[in-house]
Image (cartoon, rainbow, N blue to C red):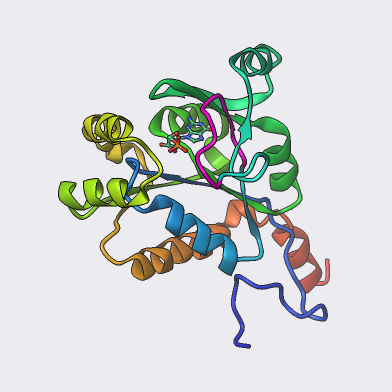
């Protein structure tokens, strides 16, 4: 196996303690974000998905606790009041929110967290967690392609697809609020781009919290 920053190094090599980062992927529905996220999770041992709570009904094949925590509106509101969300928003006709605890644990122990959240949630994270945040906006190559992908997903009714198409323009207008912008023309290229972003962001000096001690030891201090 070739050396790669996405797999653990051999135990006899020095490693630098690192604070984890929050990688946000946003896009209009159907731009290919879920495919990119899935590939990233398969290929990288250091990043895990944040599992959101939602009040929407599960789609066929979706698993509670894996794709989402499916909760009632009442439970969701109690969680909001108890301050259990890092961010939360109403998207389409449902509520979505990111549970705070698992994210804070991961970051403190040097693991990264991947978020599939919309622009409203991203704006809240910008306020609450800017230094931990890396944001990527994914755009479809064309409106026709976006619509085709929404239809071939075949999990939503024609009415839901029409609603998502109508909202795509609004969502796309938020692209300048993100650190990185990606046109998803070829999915393999997009995955490689997100991996490059992640590799560079992990090397940011401020995230390598163990570096000062390491350098002091190198200098014999
Ligand atoms: P879907 O219903 O297709 O799974 O998701 C609809 C939208 O909700 C997507 O744009 C997705 O990024 C967003 N979303 C999913 N989870 C969260 C969350 O926890 N917070 C926010 N703000 N948006 C979310």
Vertical relation: 2 (above or below) 7 = below
Q: Is residue 124 magenta?
A: no
| Of 122 and 161, the residue lying toward us | 161
Q: Residue at image x 60%, y 51%?
A: 206
Report the front residue among 158 and 102.
158
Which residue shows up at 47% across the image and 22% down it? 94
Residue 102, quarter of the rendered image:
top right
Which residue is nearer to you in this view: 139 or 71? 71
Q: Residue at x 45, y 66 (%)?
A: 196
What predominant SS class does the magenta segment belong to?
loop
Q: Is residue 13 left or right of residue 112?
A: right
The image shows residue 215, relative to residue 208, as above or below, that is below
Side of 37 relative to 106 (left or right): left
- Which image quarter is the N terminus in? bottom right
Relative depth, front residue between 149 and 114 = 149
Please identify the quarter of the rendering in which residue 87 is found. Answer: top right
- The residue at the far bottom in this view is 1
Residue 47: quarter of image: bottom right
Say above or below: 69 vs 137.
above
Query: Percent x, y for residue 202?
Result: 57, 59
Q: Residue at x 38, y 70 (%)?
A: 188
Q: Is residue 56 magenta?
A: yes
Looking at the rendered image, the quarter that the C terminus falls into is bottom right
Is 158 on the left-hand or right-hand side of 179? left
Provide residue 215's location: percent of width, then percent of height: 73, 67
Residue 162, image x, y percentages: 24, 32
Report the number of discs: 0
What are the residue bounds of the magenta stretch? 51-61
């Amino acid at each position: 196996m070739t050396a790669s920053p996405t797999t653990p190094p051999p135990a006899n090599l020095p490693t630098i303690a690192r604070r984890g980062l929050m990688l946000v992927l946003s896009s209009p529905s159907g731009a290919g974000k879920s495919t990119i996220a899935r590939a990233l999770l398969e290929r990288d041992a250091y990043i895990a998905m944040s599992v959101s709570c939602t009040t929407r009904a599960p789609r066929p094949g979706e698993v509670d606790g894996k794709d989402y925590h499916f909760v009632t509106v009442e439970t969701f509101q109690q969680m909001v009041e108890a301050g259990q969300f890092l961010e939360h928003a109403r998207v389409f006709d449902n509520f979505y929110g990111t549970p705070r605890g698992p994210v804070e644990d991961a970051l403190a122990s040097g693991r990264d967290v991947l978020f599939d959240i919309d622009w409203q949630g991203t704006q809240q994270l910008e306020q609450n967690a800017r230094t931990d945040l890396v944001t990527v906006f994914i755009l479809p190559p064309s409106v026709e392609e976006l619509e085709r992908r929404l239809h071939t997903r075949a999990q939503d009714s024609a009415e839901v697809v029409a609603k998502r198409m109508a909202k795509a323009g609004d969502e796309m207008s938020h692209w300048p609020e993100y650190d990185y912008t990606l046109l998803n023309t070829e999915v393999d290229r997009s995955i490689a781009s997100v991996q490059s972003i992640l590799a560079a962001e992990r090397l940011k000096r401020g995230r390598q919290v163990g570096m000062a001690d390491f350098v002091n030891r190198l200098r014999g201090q």
